[in-house]
Amino acid sequence: MNLAGIGMTSQRTRERLVGRLLEQGIKHWGVLDVVRSTPRHIFLDEALSHRAYEDVALPIGYNQTISQPYIVAKMTEAVLNNHPSLDTGKLNNVLEIGTGCGYQTAIIAPLARKVYSVERIKPLLEKARKNIRVLGLNNVQFKHDDGSMGWKEKGPFDAIIAAAAPRRVPEELLAQLAEGGRLIIPIGGEDVQELRLITRQGDEFHTEVVATVRFVPLFIGSIQN
Ligand code: SAH
């Protein structure tokens, strides 16, 4: 098969994926548009890339996974819905904790002015950096670090998206939310977690449970080279 053929095949399978997301209740047209135009297969090793448009999490090495497209869409939609900053078109700045291979990064980047993304496993961060460059996205700044304390110098953030689960909500992340800002984060043990959407209003934080999920644990206090 030639390259153009592969491109067309993936476009068709992506349309089907978007159809499934719609059926599952994703409504935000901006999110659906970005999923439709983002090649998920480039984030996977060749041996798995034929499964890229199935709505499942898949291994990316180092005991980590690329998130299920539905969950990525759901988290992105949750931080965007009725966000006060969207009066100006996009979110200002978004913090992502747990870059992995960068798929979620690629989905939020077109919907924000600036994305800051932290990953504790260096080779994964390098993969993500490459993927984001290949896609021509130039509004992402990466950092190899423990992201459990956020990224204070770049805050406060309109949105914080965490792709790994701590047992309780880190106070530092709440403190780095801008007025009206949203934190979406899985909270719980290894087997099952609540996906929580926390919205800041002044010094108050409103919590909504969005779904039951299973993310990898958020490591605290160490990085991996
Ligand atoms: N966002 C990815 C999912 C990555 S899986 C996607 O779109 O598919 C979660 C990632 O969180 C893993 O790569 C893991 O290494 C990372 N992680 C876990 N604890 C972390 C921490 N304290 N700081 C930064 N990254 C962390």
Image (spheres, rainbow, N blue to C red):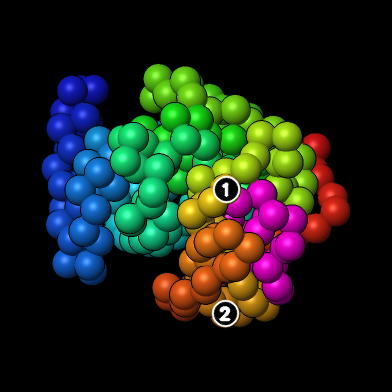
**Looking at mark 2, is its residue's CB closer than 8 Å to ligand 1?**
no
Q: Residue at x 47, y 20 (%)?
A: 138
Q: Residue at x 38, y 51 (%)?
A: 83
| Sooner in the amino-acid sequence: mark 1 or mark 2 | 1
Above or below, comparing residue 208 to residue 52 in the picture: below
Please state which of residues 9 and 108 is positioned toward the viewer in this rendering: 108
Amino acid, disc 2: Val
Residue 143 % position (x, y): 69, 33
Label 2, residues with CA under 10 Å away: few <14, some 14-19, many ≥20: some
Quarter the C terminus occupies: top right
Please state which of residues 50 and 151 is positioned toward the viewer in this rendering: 151
Q: Residue at x 59, y 67 (%)?
A: 204
Report the Cα–Cα distance between label 1 and label 2: 29 Å
In the shown orientation, is residue 31 left or right of residue 67? left
In the shown orientation, is residue 134 left or right of residue 70? right
- Residue that label 1 marks: 178
- Kindly give the residue lying farthest to the front in the view shown: 202
- Residue that label 2 marks: 192
Q: What segment carries the magenta color?
A: 160-177
Q: Confirm whether residue 192 shows in the render.
A: yes
Q: SS of the residue at dot 2?
A: loop
> Is residue 170 within the magenta segment?
yes
Amino acid, disc 1: Ala
Q: Residue at x 21, y 30 (%)?
A: 7
Residue 93 % position (x, y): 52, 37
